[in-house]
Image (tube, helix red, strand yellow):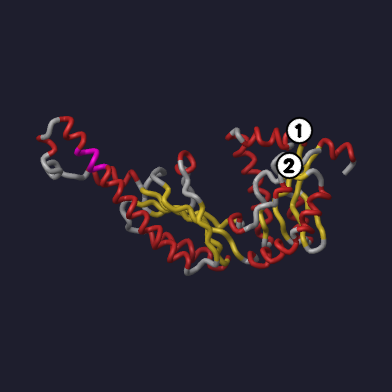
Amino acid sequence: MTESAQRQHMVYAYAVLRPTPEAARAAAVLRGVADEQVGLVETGDLAAAVGPVPAEEFEEGALKAGLEELPRLEALARGHHGVVAGLAPLGAVLPLRLATVYRDEDRVRQVLQERRDQFLPLLERLAGHVEWGVKVYTDPTDSLARDAAVPAGATGGEDALSPGRAYLAARRRRRRGAEEAWQTAARTAARIAEEAGALAVGRVAHRPQRGELAQVAGGGTAGGGKPGGENIANDAYLVSADRAEEFRSRVLAAAEGQPGVRVEVTGPWAPYSFALPPDPAARPEPV
């Protein structure tokens, strides 16, 4: 890359993998976050999937501002995941954190060399494995259905209460229902963790999602409810690829028949949760 091109472009890094002819061919047909052609930067027995991106959009200040805009963040995440997903069938791939940008390819090679003793054991461990996501929610639609099914007169004479007392009694009933749903979901999450742990070789407990993120449904779902509810558990499991469907089936079976609970199983994915995050030098660097 010429000096002029270096001033105009930075290098976006997607993943670390083994340098093979198959990996080079697969990378060459992929397009990245800036619709750039992806390629491999190699050093010895390691390679990074990278692509040239415009410096004016990916230098630190511009990138930070862009990540605060939801459409920009979503587009970046789709592009990043598209490259990782395109490489994952080749074998072990270590996905790098979203928006890992370097000044040039020489810096990428330097990081590969500096972290070789970390990357190689991880690639060995993750070979032949995939990630599954398991989320457990309370299901408010099921709770509302139970409330609606309470027969008249079964609420301790609420119909005879004043409007204010009846309102307070209804609030107490809903609060008890929510607490019962939370406890049921927590018990279900513990049972799923035990069942999943019998098949998985690794588990990462992520922070439960809140707000809009908790409303997004995907993958297999047990419980029959619609998106919504409180996210009780948000776990990632590392599973041997040849047991992937068995894992999914057993997790969903463990959640069946639990009122007030919704369980989502997503995957299989590249092992995002089990790859090391990039070191501090992986942030955008001055051009």
Disc 2 designates what residue?
284
Give the residue at x 26% y 42%.
174
Disc 1 designates what residue?
56
170 above or below 81?
above
Point out the image quarter for the N terminus. top right
Magenta stretch encompasses residue 173:
yes
Query: What residue type is disc 2 on?
Result: Pro
Instruction: Determine whether the residue tagged by mark 2 lies in a helix, strand or loop.
Output: loop
216 above or below 241?
above
- Give the number of marks: 2
Instruction: Provide residue 195's location: percent of width, then percent of height.
Output: 43, 66
Instruction: Provide residue 218's location: percent of width, then percent of height.
Output: 48, 48
Give the residue at x 82% y 48%.
105
Point out the image quarter for the C terminus. top right
Q: Which residues are magenta?
A: 169-174
Label disc, if present, on residue 269 of the rendered structure: none
- Callout 2: few (<14), some (14-19), or many (20+) C-alpha neighbours within 10 Å? many
- Callout 1: few (<14), some (14-19), or many (20+) C-alpha neighbours within 10 Å? some
Magenta stretch encompasses residue 224:
no
85 above or below 68?
below
Left or right: residue 114 compared with residue 139: right
Q: CA distance from mark 1 to mark 2?
A: 11 Å
Instruction: Provide residue 213's location: percent of width, then percent of height.
Output: 49, 42
